[in-house]
Image: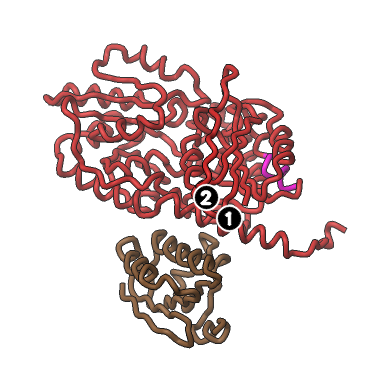
Chain colours: A red, B brown
Amino acid sequence: MRIALVSTYPPGKGSLNEYAFHFVNHLRQKPEVSEIIILADELPDGATYPTQEDTSDVAQLTIHPCWRFGAWNNVLRIRQAVRHVKPDVVLFNLQFATFADRRIPGALGLLTPWVVKSSDMISTVLLHNIMETVDLSKAGFGGNPLIEQITRLAGNIFTRVLLQADLIAVTIPKYVDILTNKYKAEHVVLAPHGAFEDIPEPDFVLPDGPLQIMTFGKFGTYKRVEALIEAFELLQNQSTQPLELVIAGTDSPNTPGYLEGVRQQYAHVPNIRYTGYVEEEDVPRIFGDAAVVVFPYNSTTGSSGVLHQAGSYGKAVVLPNLGDFAELITDEGYTGEFFQPDDADSMAQAIQKFLDSPQHRQQVGSQNYIAASGLPMSEVVDWYLLHFERLLQNKTTSPITLSQESL
Amino acid sequence: MELTYRNTNGTHILELEGRFDAYEVPKLVEWFDANPEAKFVLVNLSGVGFIDSSGLATLVKGLKRCRNKGGDLYLSNLQQAVLIIFELTRLDKAFTIFDEETAALEALPN
């Protein structure tokens, strides 16, 4: 099977790049997959993707940059690339702002799965968030209630367009319910996020030095660190033990310059380390060294890859009291301490519970490890392949029929 | 979870009873590892009232294993709560599911 994946991909820094990286790594191991073509976004400043080594024991991997974040013509360029590549299946790794941070080019990009399907290709979508559960004002698409309402209406329309794909996979059961009940879609499937790697059981040993409170991600839209820094300030004032706040990651593509602004605003707060982009090989160390991983989100746009990573490394987590997260915790067996979004006092109290008790940290970390290692991504990939095989089989066996409406 | 094994006319029948979750998955994995020749397997889930993603994943692995050998893995007697999980994941389209074990045995190749 030859699979084209439309996605961001490392070293590109767009949202969902790490998910794509791990997904592809597992997909390559499957004997039924002969080739994967990543239809990736073009890297800035003329940079190129590294050449992939040909290895006989895994599927061939080609990276074909053919779209640009923010461009208006992505739909046409991707369609052209798909026609050129002629894969058996196209999988889009998407969230609503994958193609742009502005409404029109972002929305045009979301037409692509439908356009690809119209070219007689099998078009499938992994949709990481749905419009119904996104707080638009906090996710960078709001500002004015009227504009927010129009954006939501447009979101509904574009959800219907996305649902024209042959298969829509989502990572949270609630999303299946919403898409099935509201849009009467019958081809929406639950495909859990899955744990990125088969990581050995953590030893829960922390490095010497200050206890590290870590947050990881792309910041500036709904992931904002102001309240976290203020909570950290409170903790440093209250605590006698040395602490360090590690802000690991970069600006969201929607909010360039955000972290630099934060750095200047809170220059007076000591013991904060900004790591910048974390290379894949540094991820285990960043998580391993952390005593607590904090999710300073004031909204969510889907399941959290970072939560799965934190669980894989057996970390205690501090989470916002938000619908999606609470559901994820319940559904997938994670646990943590909760805080009221954007409330520094509440966040400080939640973090303090872990700083005060190594036993509590380890107990929660152990439970999160079990939750994260329950379903490896390698097995989730098998589910996709079963769906792909079924779609391919249907395509080859179904006679072409014309409905009354189309006549 | 209890796992009971029977062989009827060459079809391996596994009857599971109890919660089928991450903690119980090794039992089924061990059975597959101990029976590498099994081509046609019927899993009777009448006694399973709960299945999680790990349980589903184990059945998918079993399905792939049987199909790679030219066989198949069938399911029967799913309780409503379990059937809902299969429908949510649309894995009900990937497996052949029978209402009753007897119907499955009549339909399966000997």
The image quadrant of residue A211 is top left
Q: Main secondary structure of the magenta part?
A: helix
Q: Is residue A375 left or right of residue A125?
A: left
Task: Please tell me whether residue A250 is drawn above or below residue B104 in the rendered image.
Answer: above
- Residue topped by disc 2: A170
Q: Quadrant of the C terminus of chain B?
A: bottom right
- Residue topped by disc 1: A188
Residue A115 forms part of the magenta stretch: yes
Label 2 vs 1, first from the N-terminus: 2
Q: Which region shows up in magenta?
A: A111-118
Q: Quadrant of the N terminus of chain B?
A: bottom left
Where's residue A334, x and y in %? 32, 49
| Extreme residue toward the right, this view | A407
Q: Are marks 2 and 1 in contact (CB under 8 Å)?
A: yes
Taking the spot 72% from the left edge, 38% from the top edge, the residue there is: A79
Amino acid beneath label 1: Val
